[in-house]
Amino acid sequence: MSQFISVFDMLKIGVGPSSSHTLGPWRAAQQWIQKLKETNEFLLIEEVKVDLYGSLSLTGKGHATDLAVLLGLSGADPEYVPIESIDVIISDIQNKEQLFFNNERNIPFFKGSVKFNREFLPFHANGMTFRGYAQGEEISTETYYSIGGGFIVQEDDHLAEDIEINKQNFPFPINRATELEAYCEKENLNISDIVYQNELVINSAEDIDKELHRIWNTMLECMYIGCHTQGTLPGGLNVKRRAFETHQKLIKDAEYTNQQEWITAIRSTEVKFREILKWVSCLALSVNEVNAALGRVVDWSNPCCFNVLFSN
């Protein structure tokens, strides 16, 4: 059976730098806690250990996989956690060797509680196992796989089963791009019209409008922060942020006090092809840098951001 997902499953809001290596493990930690609560084991847990396998282990440090796990276990949500509080939460866990489990109660969490294992699990390259202990015994063991785009599965799951919808419920069921093209020609509709009609099966018009605005505001904030932040990127390589200086050269002496005025200022600059290419590079770089610095981003954001900024 085909799987159908919402546009909001493709345009995910989260914390960088990676949907598969950061957002996925973060969501897996949250999902494990939810399962512990469903089985009435949450209050029994006295210690937690996490094993990262394969790609999550080999590139986990660079993608902040271990930090994402800590944040997920702490009860922070990647869509809403104040970015400035991330370092505080992580430092508190590492310095005190104590985890405020799901933001509810303190349990020990030692420096070796997250283990990087080089071996790959057979089901998928991005595997992780959460282990919960009570009175020295392991009472909960759950393995999750981060399969990309922030999606999490377990070995006996059917992908995105919770959002699977029967094909017949959609006015325009689509499995291939050629089918989408055929609908557009037959109905004389734009791609956005077709997608919107299908989306109405999953979400109300009010929710669609609200979520699209939330996604755009996140994109705008991401670009704005990237263009107005100096210094070096985290990770130990001392990589200098470049978007700030590029932005200064492009924006020139334009005055603005907030993000909306910033958009107006950008639109008032030169729109020659060469300048537009510079803006494309600047905005893409700004999002890149926010993403690398554990900032809040939206997957697939760059083209959408550019189109909105330069559209009247």
Image (cartoon, rainbow, N blue to C red):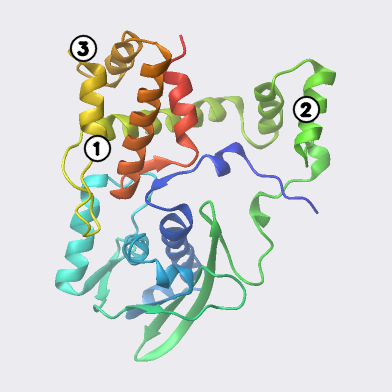
Q: Residue at x 39, y 41 (%)?
A: 297
Q: Residue at x 76, y 31 (%)?
A: 180
* Quarter assignment of residue 82: top left
Give neighbour class at mark 1: few <14, some 14-19, many 20+ (Cα, 10 Å): some
Report helix, strand or loop for mark 3. Answer: loop
Between marks 1 and 2, how big is the CA–CA gap?
40 Å
* Quarter assignment of residue 8: top right
Query: From the viewer's perspective, is the residue at label 3 or at label 1 nearer?
Result: 1
Compared across the picture, whether 149 is left or right of 226 comes to: right
Report helix, strand or loop for mark 1. Answer: loop
Please name the residue that numbered disc 1 is placed on. Answer: 242
Q: Residue at x 39, y 10 (%)?
A: 271
Give the image location of residue 89, x and y in percent: 22, 59
Cβ atoms at labels 2 and 3 below 8 Å apart: no
Mark nearer the N terminus (1 vs 2): 2
Give the image location of residue 233, x and y in percent: 23, 49
Report helix, strand or loop for mark 2. Answer: helix
Please name the residue that numbered disc 3 is placed on. Answer: 254
* Amino acid residing under circle 3: Ala
* Amino acid residing under circle 2: Glu
Residue 45 visible from this viewpoint: no
Give neighbour class at mark 2: few <14, some 14-19, many 20+ (Cα, 10 Å): some
Give the image location of residue 7, x and y in percent: 60, 37
